Amino acid sequence: MSIDRRSFVNATLAGAVGALLPVRGSWADGAGSAAVPAEIAARTGSGKSISLAVSDIKDFDASLRGDLIRAGDAGYDAARRLWNPAFDHHPALIARCSGAADVVQAVQFARSHDLLTAVRGGGHSLSGQSGCDGGLVIDLSTMKGIRVDPVRQRADAEPGVLLGEFDQESQAFGLATTLGTAPDTGIAGLTLGGGFGRLDRRFGLACDNLRSVDIVTADGALRHASAQENQDLYWGVRGGGGNFGVVTSFDYQLHSLGPRVLAGYRAFPLDQARSVMAALTEFAENMPDEMYVAFDIGRWEKQPTVGYEAFYSGAPSDGERLLAPLQKLGKPVYDDVAIKTYVAAQGVTGKVRAEPSKTVIYYKSGFVGDLSATLIDELVRRFETSPPVVQGLVLFRHGGAAVRVNPGATAFWNRWMKYTLLLIGSWDRSHNDASVRTARAFWGGLEPFTHNYYVNTDVYEGEQRLRATYGDNYPRLVKLKDRYDPKNLFRLNANILPTGRA
């Protein structure tokens, strides 16, 4: 089994394994209790088996305000579970941090023992890399502080905050910033990898709205990074993922918005797919920055459909006027486009919870320039004969403020993109091995139409593909990695390898 989870196939095939690691020796606590292990088996980042002395673990536990959870402890199974059930990780230790001081202790413990280390924010990691087998999970999910400054239009948020929670808090002051499209996603991973969302054409990516961070780097030091301080780190965390440390606080720029927007989804029979997608492509070429559209072909409403999501962040009446030409597409089989609150448009319907998915989720992505008739035809043709594991193909239209940023201004390099093409697969866990092969083969026919990929959706598959994704920014990212994490402690991500390490 691949320790660093660089292959989705290996990870999903290993999902059914996950037996608890053995313990060696025992000691009695002097009070006549049952024997407990004197050592606990663990793994290093390179996959080597090691033993952790219980005395060291007890000292680590005592240094934390939060909880240190081990296999066999109450709540261990719930704490190790990830959103995507493709992954069934069994870490040796889970440090549930209460604040930045706990993160410092956790990083120092991981470094001193050369432990395989995963970092968990909201736990929505599609790749499974917010968990690990035999290592330490630095769990930030209970760090949920949010402080909005409505005068400065800024918000400080901790890494366990979910998108919906952030939206609820900021909208209480009539403010918002670009975040993703699923309310149970964590802000941390999404922002560090770039951060697409319904507002990115108007306000830029999530990382473009990041004004500063507090970050614990691999040496265990807590640093502040902004345009004025540790500028190299500030550049790197805006798109470079979790390669350089554990962010304990995000400072976002907010914008006046809402409270009501025009938003919703319309679906049509699949036999209209080519004409609908052609009309949407034409519509998207000249739409204003306030308009967001994503269109798809999929199995969303118990039948094969083609459809589009529209979101307009300006005056709702202007949005209705802009969408009027799409009435020529005919009567939809589903339509919930309406004026609604911003938080409702973001999918928030009550208390936001990060409940695990009931099915395995599989994503592949690639960026696309112009959406040609040839590609539209290929998408439709392939989906019409697609296997059941392929749930849908989605095209997110970018542009506006998100692409007006210089590619070298942040670590996120792909500012040329017009679309992200996303394959969504889903199936019961019992079908993992064959289903992964089927989904990968399906994507293989579409990948030649794409360039690079979105690091927040895909599993790391090697340096070559990642190097292309970061383009001219890659050498600078390697220098940052060499400076702040030369031993690659933070490797469970879209991993930028330090010089001389494989």
Image: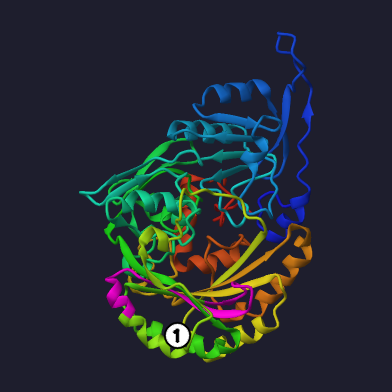
Q: Residues within 10 Å of mark 1 (few under 14, many from 20)?
A: some
Vertical order, 60 against 244 (above or below): above
Tell me which residue sits at (74%, 52%) in the image. 15
**Residue 75, horizontal then vertical, whole percent:** 64, 34
Disc 1 designates what residue? Answer: 281
Vertical order, 108 against 36 (above or below): below
- Tell whether position 312 is magenta: yes
143 or 257: which is nearer to us?
257
Residue 72 in sight in this render: yes
233 or 193: which is nearer to us?
193
**What number of labels is visible?**
1
Tell me which residue sits at (45%, 85%) in the image. 281
**Residue 36, horizontal then vertical, whole percent:** 74, 20
44 or 152: which is nearer to us?
152
SS under mark 1: helix
108 or 118: which is nearer to us?
118
* Left or right: residue 73 compared with residue 292: right
First to last magenta residue range: 296-320
- Tell whether position 318 is magenta: yes
Residue 321 quadrant? bottom left
* Left or right: residue 388 compared with residue 286: right
Going by the numbered disc 1, the residue's amino acid type is: Thr
**Residue 126, horizontal then vertical, whole percent:** 59, 57
Instruction: Return the residue found at the far top.
Output: 31
Vertical order, 171 against 112 (above or below): below
**Residue 250, horizontal then vertical, whole percent:** 38, 47
Residue 252 in sight in this render: no
Tell me which residue sits at (37%, 51%) in the image. 168
User: Which quarter of the rendered picture does the C terminus lie within?
Assistant: bottom right
Q: Which colour scheme is used?
A: rainbow
